[in-house]
Image (tube, rainbow, N blue to C red):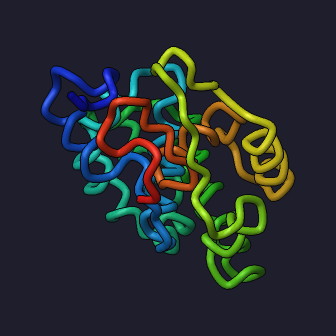
Amino acid sequence: MQKKCEWCLGDPIYEKYHDEEWGRRATDDKTLFEFLILEGAQAGLSWITILKKRENYRAAFDNFNYRTIAAYDENKIAQLLNNPGIVRNKRKISSAIRNARAFIEVINEFGSFYNYLVRFTGKTQIINSYNSVKDLPPKTSLSDSISADLKKRGFSFVGSTIIYSFMQAVGFVNDHVAGCPLAGKTL
């Protein structure tokens, strides 16, 4: 009998995320930016913490409109630091603004952030076949390369582990484990 990946079991928010988003290829810049920011916000915290705050993030960060976020000023940063619905970490908030500006530069250079990413990954989803969530790597040589390039372009909170989680979240990698109905499929 097939079952879902064990990391999501027991929490309806996690299970919905697993079933409907994790490992499914995102190609639009808004979704890619949202996950890049959320993955950075998650650093040092659990992913479920961020998922539970996701709607608050959407409201606080103008629905992840990277052009609007790129123009945030000190007043907006102060407002965000007082918002109990998000992670109130000045470095992470400042990073979201810096990343919005760098994201726009990448779009200007490559036409879209998706086009930038497929330079590293190709257009075919990477499908791994791990037996257990314990077998999933925290990072790979591919996430190392993307992370290093993003840092050169001025991004922050984009370490290799964050980028590997990002790649899983937006479906450049399918790491659903053996036994999961979504394992081994292009999503």
Horizontal arrangement in the rendering, residue 102 relative to residue 127 (left or right) = right
Horizontal arrangement in the rendering, residue 120 relative to residue 101 (left or right) = right
Quarter of the rendering containing residue 112: bottom right
State the count of labels.
Answer: 0
In the depicted structure, whether residue 132 falls above or below residue 122? above
- Identified at 53% across, 51% down, the residue is 36
Quarter of the rendering containing residue 136: top right
- Identified at 34% across, 30% down, the residue is 179
Quarter of the rendering occupied by the C terminus:
bottom left
Farthest residue, direction front: 1
Q: Is residue 148 or residue 100 the one in the foreground?
A: 148
- Identified at 16% across, 20% down, the residue is 10
In the depicted structure, whether residue 171 falls above or below residue 4? below
- Where is residue 34? Give x, y as percent: 44, 56
- Where is residue 22? Give x, y as percent: 38, 46
In the depicted structure, whether residue 41 falls above or below residue 148? above
In the depicted structure, whether residue 20 falls above or below residue 64? above
Q: Is residue 54 or residue 26 the one in the foreground?
A: 26
- Where is residue 19? Give x, y as percent: 25, 46
- Where is residue 84? Give x, y as percent: 26, 32
Farthest residue, direction top: 134
Horizontal arrangement in the rendering, residue 133 relative to residue 139 (left or right) = left
- Identified at 47% across, 74% down, the residue is 28
Q: Is residue 128 or residue 30 the one in the foreground?
A: 128
Quarter of the rendering occupied by the N terminus:
top left
Horizontal arrangement in the rendering, residue 130 relative to residue 179 (left or right) = right
